[in-house]
Amino acid sequence: MSATVSPKTDPLLKVSALNAFYGRAHILFDVALEVGRGEVVALMGRNGAGKSTTMKAVMGLLDRAEGEVSFRGKDISRARPYEIARDGMGFVPEDRRVFSDLSVMENLEVGRQPAREGAVQWTPEKLFQLFPNLGEMPDRPGGQMSGGEQQMLTVSRTLMGNPYLVLLDEPSEGVAPVIVEQMANMIMTLKREGMAILLSEQNLHFAELVSDRAYVLENGHIRYQGSMAQLAADEEVRRAYLSV
């Protein structure tokens, strides 16, 4: 069940025949997806469907993964995570991972990378416009922030790397509704700036607000791909793969 819709230009990220393993357990099965420049693509599915594993495999964080991953026309299938980050891919993990003893400003400095040609250049001042909450607490240690504030800080630290593409894992999970709204506004701002985002998400409403296209995972298999509008209108697919 799919309506194949691809980026209008050469994809920024192209994943083909991606298989991934945890020990002997086979988790992803021939996953294929694309993300175009300035595009927001949602990777959807229930808990355990393989969304986070897909992101970790793309980012080079798994010990065992097979397949082809191309980023900006370069094969990164065998690259190390720091090499992929240096090429301009950012990753915001679900568990946030702020440096709890460092201040907001110090956390941001950790993520700083040089400006990249064709990428948005981020500064703390620009990020504080995006997340005013952080601008009010530049000296607060990361460990003394709420979960939503830590989520903002993790996103901001990633953006300090001036990435072309951000992998955003479950940004609406476990945070207050006001933070979810700010996250949606943030994604739309990044999209207007021309940044690409691969978004792992269970919240259909949130994904519908921000995404152009969607892939649906079930048990490590891509079961559906199409425009976000097509997915939102397809009750059969939603019931089969997204309903709790």
Image (tube, helix red, strand yellow):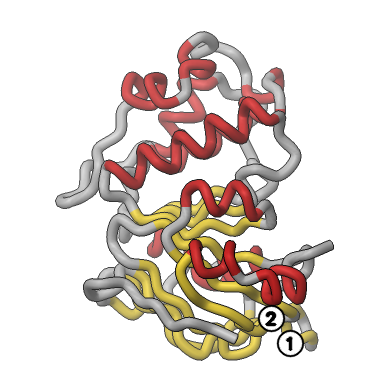
Nearest to the observer: residue 109 or residue 74: 74
Q: Which residue is mark 2?
A: 220
Q: For the point 52% across and 21% down, which residue is it?
A: 104
Image-based side of 189 in relation to 92, left or right: left
- The x and y percentages for residue 8 are 25, 72
- Indicate left or right for 243 with 81 as reference: right
Name the foreground residue: 25 vs 201.
Answer: 201
Question: At x 70% / y 18%, what residue is drawn?
Answer: 144
Quadrant in which residue 82 is drawn: bottom left
Instruction: For marks 2 and 1, give the CA distance.
Output: 9 Å
Q: Earlier in the sequence, mark 2 or mark 1?
A: 1
Q: Secondary structure at mark 1?
A: strand
On the rendered image, what quadrant is the C terminus found in?
A: bottom right
From the top left corner, tell me how far across and down residue 7 is, in percent: 31, 72
User: Label 1 amino acid?
Assistant: His
Local SS, label 2: loop
Say whether residue 72 is left or right of residue 161: left
Labelled disc at residue 241: none
Q: Residues within 10 Å of mark 2 (few under 14, many from 20)?
A: many
Figure quadrant of the N terminus = bottom right
- Residue at 21 percent of width and 42 percent of height: 115
Whether residue 56 is visible, yes or no, is no
Relative image position of residue 58 (x, y in whole percent): 50, 71
Q: Work out whether 149 lies above or below 173.
A: above
- Amino acid type of the residue tagged 2 in the rendering: Gly
Name the residue beneath numbered marker 1. 26
Question: Which one is in front in this view, the residue at disc 2 or the one at disc 1?
Answer: 2
Quarter of the figure with residue 146: top right
- Residue at position x 53%, y 16% in the image: 133
Are the residues tagged 2 and 1 within 8 Å (C-beta)? yes
Between residues 61 and 164, which one lies in front from this camera angle? Answer: 164
Vertical position of residue 208 compared to residue 70: above or below = above
